[in-house]
Image (spheres, rainbow, N blue to C red):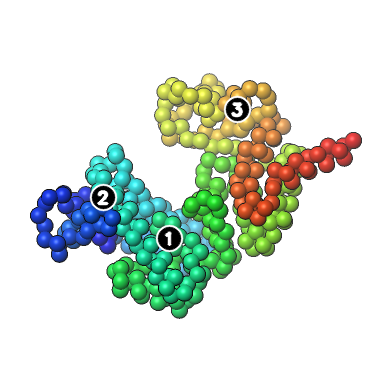
């Protein structure tokens, strides 16, 4: 959007007479955008990228994992999210400056650039591993990558740079869901439950450990055994209650909700006990044992104990799904392993 000045205020309506040399023409769709002056999206994006670059430079002077490093890393990641959101905003019907051709042009140029980069990578003999809407992954060869960047700069007029170099990387069946092992031993997660706020700490911890074992020790079987052992600890109720709390946001006044959702039922219980719940608040709840639908078994976590919790719900709805998607890549059936362990435990009891 920066390179081709894609913006609602630079868009040239069809039929408008503008000299060819003064516009950029989007491939596939043919939408035109003035080369000058800079559009509002270009200005915003340049400011955001500049701010992120400053933070990334600062990161290089800090100890990895230190409080300051985590703070600046969180800030640069937040700016990255906002930067990437500009395209989504441009294509949102409710956007103040919504113009459909703006989003279409950005998509068309994105496809063109990624496709061109993939072709150039192959021409240079780079082993292309993966490509999506805004990224290309290649087997790292410093000399060839440097040459690729130089060719892209000259042919496409774009400044590309290696974002991260992974020692090892795991791709799943879903787009934009992968995990890479960095040179310093840290794991870089994209799209996994670990980075999402609507999963329990238990689910995140188990998934994180599974990824660590697979990428660092290259042992899917050991990862499976870890999950089986964790589930055993969970069944013995040796996992802290705080790791089983599910957090959900309240987005509007409680009385406006027409659906029966667990976090809404938990919020109603809190309100009955004198708490005040506002839109924007987060409600933490656990699922307790009993019969009936899930929403009827959701209670605020501060009113529950580990003995109340429906352990099987957490095993099959929180622990298994995030790791199953990873382990099945290696042919490891975690459900089968857990079922076998449960049967063996039952037989041992006799």
Q: Residue at x 66, y 34 (%)?
A: 313
Please state the horizontal and vertical placement of residue 116, each as a whole percent of the image: 36, 65
Q: CA distance from mark 3 to mark 1?
A: 40 Å
Q: Residue 350 or 57: which is nearer the viewer?
A: 350
Position of 99 with respect to 170 (left or right) is left
**Count of marks, rendered view:** 3
- Residue 246 is labelled as none
- Disc 1 and disc 2: Cα gap in Å? 21 Å
User: Label 3: few (<14), some or many (≥20) within 10 Å?
Assistant: some
> Residue lying farthest left?
17
At x 38%, y 62%, the residue is 115
In this figure, which residue is indicated by the disc labeled 3? Answer: 294
Question: In terms of secondary structure, where does tag 1 sit?
Answer: loop
* Direction bottom: furthest residue: 143
Identify the mark nearer the N-term, 3 or 1.
Answer: 1
- Give the quarter of the image for residue 2: bottom left
Q: Is residue 209 visible?
A: no
Residue identifier under label 2: 102
Q: Is residue 314 above or below residue 26?
A: above
Name the residue: 62% across, 53% down: 329
From the top left corner, tell me how far across and down residue 171 is, in percent. 55, 57
Task: Determine crowd level at label 2: few under 14, some 14-19, many 20+ residues with C-alpha closer than 10 A.
Answer: many
Check disc 1 and report the residue beneath it.
Answer: 135
Vertically, is 254 above or below 246?
Answer: above
């Amino acid at each position: 959007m920066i390179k081709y000045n894609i913006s609602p205020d630079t868009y040239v309506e069809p039929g408008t007479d503008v000299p060819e040399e003064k516009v950029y023409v989007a491939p596939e769709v043919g939408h035109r955008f003035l080369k000058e002056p800079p559009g509002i999206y270009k200005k915003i994006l340049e400011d955001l990228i500049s701010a992120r670059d400053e933070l990334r430079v600062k990161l290089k002077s800090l100890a990895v994992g230190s409080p300051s490093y985590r703070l600046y890393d969180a800030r640069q990641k937040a700016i990255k999210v906002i930067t990437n959101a500009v395209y989504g905003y441009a294509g949102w019907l409710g956007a103040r400056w919504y113009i459909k051709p703006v989003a279409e042009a950005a998509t068309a140029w994105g496809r063109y650039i990624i496709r061109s980069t993939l072709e150039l990578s192959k021409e240079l003999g780079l082993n292309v591993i993966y490509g999506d809407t805004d990224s290309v992954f290649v087997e790292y060869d410093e000399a060839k990558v440097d040459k690729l960047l130089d060719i892209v700069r000259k042919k496409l007029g774009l400044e590309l740079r290696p974002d991260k170099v992974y020692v090892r990387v795991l791709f799943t069946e879903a787009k934009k869901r992968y995990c890479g092992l960095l040179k310093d031993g840290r794991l870089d997660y994209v799209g996994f439950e670990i980075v999402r706020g609507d999963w329990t700490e238990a689910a995140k911890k188990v998934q994180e450990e599974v990824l660590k074992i697979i990428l660092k020790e290259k042992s899917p079987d050991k990862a499976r055994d870890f999950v089986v052992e964790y589930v055993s600890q969970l069944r013995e109720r040796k996992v802290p209650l705080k790791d089983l709390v599910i957090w959900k946001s309240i987005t509007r006044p409680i009385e406006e909700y027409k659906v029966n959702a667990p976090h809404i039922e938990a919020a109603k219980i809190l309100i009955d006990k004198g708490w005040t719940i506002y839109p924007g608040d987060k409600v933490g709840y656990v699922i307790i044992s009993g019969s009936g639908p899930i929403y009827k078994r959701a209670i605020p976590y501060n009113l529950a104990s580990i003995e109340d919790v429906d352990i099987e719900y957490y095993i099959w709805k929180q622990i298994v799904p995030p790791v199953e998607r990873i382990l099945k890549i290696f042919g490891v059936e975690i459900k089968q392993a857990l079922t076998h362990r449960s049967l063996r435990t039952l037989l041992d009891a006799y």
